[in-house]
Amino acid sequence: MSSSAYAGASCGAIRAERAAATVRLASLFEDQRTARNNDVVSVIILGIPAASLSGADRSNEIAALKGQIAAMDGRGC
């Protein structure tokens, strides 16, 4: 995501949105950690990564949110 997406936003609005994104990112990291741990167990027991196959993998959401945060940071507020 480009920082130009935040060109018209005030620094206060960007800071508030970044704070919310940081909280969401922490939650996604925890979800991903849980999915990874569940995958380890299911691979040992079943031979397949059940959590990843069931949609518990949050890596794409984490990457997108990191991009949004980087774009906000690139705005210079």
Image: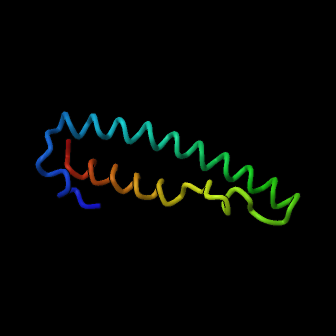
Can you give x and y, in whole percent of width and height, for residue 5 in the image?
20, 56
In which quadrant of the rendered view does residue 14 lie? top left
Q: Residue furthest right?
A: 45
Asked if 55 appears above or below 24 in the picture, the reply is below
Q: What residue is at 88 percent from the left and 58 percent from the top?
A: 45
Q: What residue is at 14 percent from the left and 44 percent from the top?
A: 9
How many badges with numbers are in the image? Answer: 0
Can you give x and y, in whole percent of width and height, for residue 40 in the image?
78, 56
Can you give x and y, in whole percent of width and height, for residue 51 in the image?
70, 56
In which quadrant of the rendered view does residue 13 lie? top left
Residue 55 located left or right of residue 10: right
Q: What residue is at 40 percent from the left and 53 percent from the top?
A: 66
Residue 51 located left or right of residue 14: right
Q: What residue is at 17 percent from the left and 38 percent from the top?
A: 11
Q: What colouring method underlies this structural image?
A: rainbow
Can you give x and y, in whole percent of width and height, for residue 39 in the image?
74, 56
Q: Residue furthest bottom?
A: 47
Q: Looking at the rendering, in which quadrant would you find the N terminus?
A: bottom left
Q: Residue furthest front?
A: 54
Q: Looking at the rendering, in which quadrant would you find the C terminus?
A: top left
